[in-house]
Image (cartoon, rainbow, N blue to C red):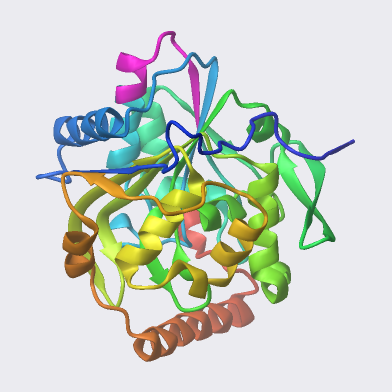
Amino acid sequence: MSCTASKRPIKEATDECPVMPVACSLVEDITEEEGLIGGISRAFKIGKIPVKKADSIVIKPNLCYYWDSSTGQTTSPRLVGALIEFLRSHWRNDPEIFIAEADASAMKTKHVFRMLGYEALANDKEVELLNLSENPTVDCRTTVDSLDVVLPFSRRLLQADLLINVPKLKYHRTPKVTCALKNIFGAIAKPFKFSYHPHLSRTIVAANKIVKSDIVLVDGLVALGDRPKVMKTLLLGEDVLAVDYAASRIIGFDPQSVDHLRLAKQEGLGDDTESEIVGEASLEELRRRFPRVSYLRQKISWGLQLWLLRTYARIVGDSVPPILIKG
């Protein structure tokens, strides 16, 4: 069985709303659930995002290796918990909610769910964890830059009524901007995604042409640039490309200098991207607050981390510490 795209259409700007706004709210205490719920609620009001009926909702956080959310690398489980509470109190029905992630080259989802607090969160909130690499998959076909691309995705992900993309606001030296589009790349069911890296931008765009994000909630509670920094910031939007353009500008890049963003615009993945940030902080304020980016320092740091991972894997024959399996 194969597929060509998900059932959710790409959202486009209209004459009445030529610019897709990206809503911004600030959270005073990033550890307190009520404050996080309030921040999410204000962002929805600022962005005028309607409440929709959905029988099944998939939340896709960014779980990167085994780094705690305090590092700025991964989506905060507290934020996801607050989002679940917001959905249940504001949605028109009682939807089935899933938290979904896929295996990566040096990360196994079943361990990262436990290690980063998502297993406990799922038990507390009575939602289901979904391993997108173990769930039955389907090969999906699309074209990017006139080239065919085939990627495996979970059937349950493709069949969800609503997909809420919850990425991080962070810099990475390879794609420069790691936000909403890159987070959907992480949903590809194939565990060893290193094989896609020679054509990373094309694969990121292909993944987003197949899997459409309905709502993007960016976790900027702890942002990552040259270092992690508490920013207490949430961004919210319905247009995945507009959100990533806003994130790129906050981090300090012209979006057209980011390969996968330029290609995504070329492929018509969203608005014309002249989106503005509206709400409780301006673009200029957020740029001042974001920790500056040092390509050289992250290159050294990232290279050291990869060397340690590869050394561990060579010694023990696995990328996952045994203590995690015993837990």
Q: Position of residue 80 (x, y in %)?
A: 35, 37
How many marks on residues? 0
Q: Position of residue 247 (x, y in %)?
A: 37, 59
Q: Quadrant of the N terminus?
A: top right
Q: Is residue 216 above or below residue 109?
A: above
Magenta segment range? 86-98
Q: Residue at x 63, y 49 (%)?
A: 208
- Seen from the viewer's position, the closer of residues 181 and 194 is 181
Return the residue found at the far front: 15
Q: Is residue 15 above or below residue 177?
A: above
Q: Residue at x 44, y 87 (%)?
A: 299
Q: Is residue 163 above or below residue 229?
A: above
Residue 262 visible? The answer is: yes
- Seen from the viewer's position, the closer of residues 281 and 274 is 274
Q: Is residue 123 above or below residue 200?
A: above
Q: Position of residue 214 (x, y in %)?
A: 52, 34
